Image (spheres, rainbow, N blue to C red):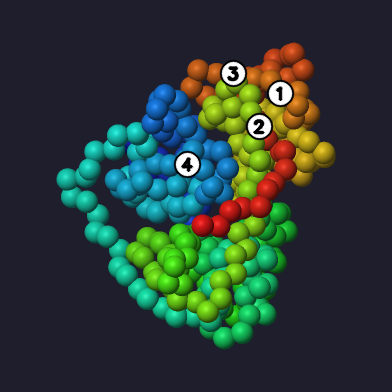
Amino acid sequence: MSVGFTWDGAPLAGEAGGSLAAALHAAGIRVLGRSWRCSRPRGLYCLAGACDGCQVLADGVATTACMTPLRDGVRVEPYRSLVPLPADPPALGGYEEIEVDVLVVGAGEAGLRAAAVAEGRVLVVERDREPGGWLLADPDGRARIEPLVAAAGAEVRTSATFIGRFADGLCGVVSAAGLMAVRAARVEAHAGSDECGLAFPGNDLPGILLAAGAQRLLVRDGVPAGRRVVIAAVDGEGRQIAGLLRAAGSDVQVVPAGAVTAAHGDEVLEAVTADGGTLACDALLLAVGRRAARVP
């Protein structure tokens, strides 16, 4: 179902239940804000809530667009380094204290399997808007998520970010509903992995995305990263997203990651230099491996 929202005052429409990031990208919006120091354009990058590239203002509140579901009538604006305080600030959320035997951080496949074998009262918290983790980037992954959730038999809270465990053993979890203080006998962290990036001139231009994030955008929300796509890959990475993008109608070229030496464009990506030649493109995907995600 399509719902209406605004971007910097202009009316747009997007799919209800999808992310703000997907709705903005599908509408052709690439520059979502500016860096605080050099005022460089910022846009989608990891699509996993691990960076600040897609930070925007939603009804005056700073939020990460890839982690935020689109809702009807929301007023979305670019994030700027100096954000004026709203005249009528939104009310702060509530406060809740709960006690559990096991707190599982991360509702990907590993986290859900850990919850299934844990004993006692189990709470699973996930910063994304639904459970599944990287399974959400797999064309066959969604069919595996529901049985995992059912087998876990635990309370799963989504759009809930674990912020740390403190000296007295109390854990903090924050969400749109407010702050939750969780006292857990045991904490298990299954935060999965984050993708690695590449360093080269212009590597922060909107239009440069991490490959698995772009795959989540396509598989989960049906939005291709671009129509002329270059994939910088190592060790056979990027094959699946290349095939999926080609099936979606995108023109895709895969090059060795080490061949990419620069990205070009004034506000958004327009071309990359690879092996000394220039390739015109509107998206560059970095498929260069992953590293274990850090948990506070």
Give the farthest residue toward the bottom. Answer: 120
Left/right of residue 67 with respect to residue 209 in the rendered view: left
Residue under the image location 71 percent in, 54 percent down: 139
Q: Which residue is labeled 3 in the image?
A: 264
CA separation in Å, label 4 and label 1: 24 Å
Q: Which residue is labeled 4 in the image?
A: 52
Q: Is residue 271 above or below residue 233?
A: above
Residue under the image location 46 percent in, 72 percent down: 169
Give the secondary structure at mark 1.
strand
Label placed on residue 29: none
Q: Can the viewer see residue 208 in this picture?
A: yes
Question: Looking at the image, which is closer to me, 256 or 12?
Answer: 256
The reply to whether discs 2 and 3 touch (Cβ–Cβ < 8 Å) is no
CA separation in Å, label 2 and label 4: 17 Å
CA separation in Å, label 2 and label 1: 9 Å
Q: Which residue is labeled 2 in the image?
A: 198
Q: Which residue is labeled 1 in the image?
A: 260
Give the secondary structure at mark 4.
loop
Q: Residues within 10 Å of mark 3 (few under 14, many from 20)?
A: some
The reply to whether discs 4 and 1 touch (Cβ–Cβ < 8 Å) is no
Residue under the image location 72 percent in, 38 percent down: 288
The reply to whether discs 3 and 1 touch (Cβ–Cβ < 8 Å) is no
